Image (cartoon, grey):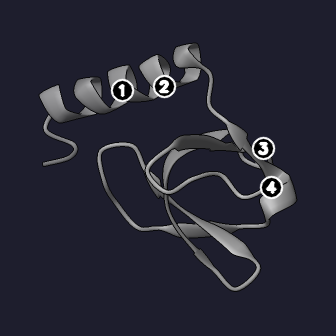
């Protein structure tokens, strides 16, 4: 099952959390929390992100932003 666009999902191969941006061909397209380059993942390698995983991604982004590493 492909996750809905706008939902948060985890790429189980890498453990990265991303926002579902679309479904292109057989792939789910994820974008990192806070923006960045999208990447393609096979639908069987994607699962919904837990609230804890979403919070961890948001915290990591906020910390990187406060250090000036991301805009």
Q: Which residue is mark 1?
A: 58
Q: Nearer the viewer, residue 35 or 23?
A: 23
Residue 13 vs 21, above or below: the answer is above
Q: Which residue is mark 2?
A: 54
**Do the residues under discs 1 and 4 have CB atoms within 8 angstroms?**
no
Q: Nearer the viewer, residue 59 or 30?
A: 30
Q: Residue at x 18, y 34 (%)?
A: 65
Q: Position of residue 64 (x, y in %)?
A: 26, 32
Residue 65 vs 21, above or below: the answer is above
Q: Secondary structure at mark 2?
A: helix
Q: Secondary structure at mark 4?
A: loop
Left or right side of 30 for 35: left
Quadrant of the drawing holding the N terminus: bottom right
Left or right side of 7 for 15: right
N-terminal-most mark, 1 or 4: 4
N-terminal-most mark, 3 or 4: 4
Q: Residue at x 43, y 50 (%)?
A: 6
């Amino acid at each position: 099952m492909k996750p809905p666009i706008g939902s948060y999902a985890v790429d189980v191969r890498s453990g990265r959390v991303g926002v579902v941006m679309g479904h292109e061909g057989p792939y789910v397209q994820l974008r990192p929390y806070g923006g960045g380059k999208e990447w393609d993942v096979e639908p069987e390698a994607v699962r919904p992100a837990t609230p804890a995983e979403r919070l961890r991604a948001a915290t990591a982004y906020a910390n990187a932003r406060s250090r000036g590493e991301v805009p």
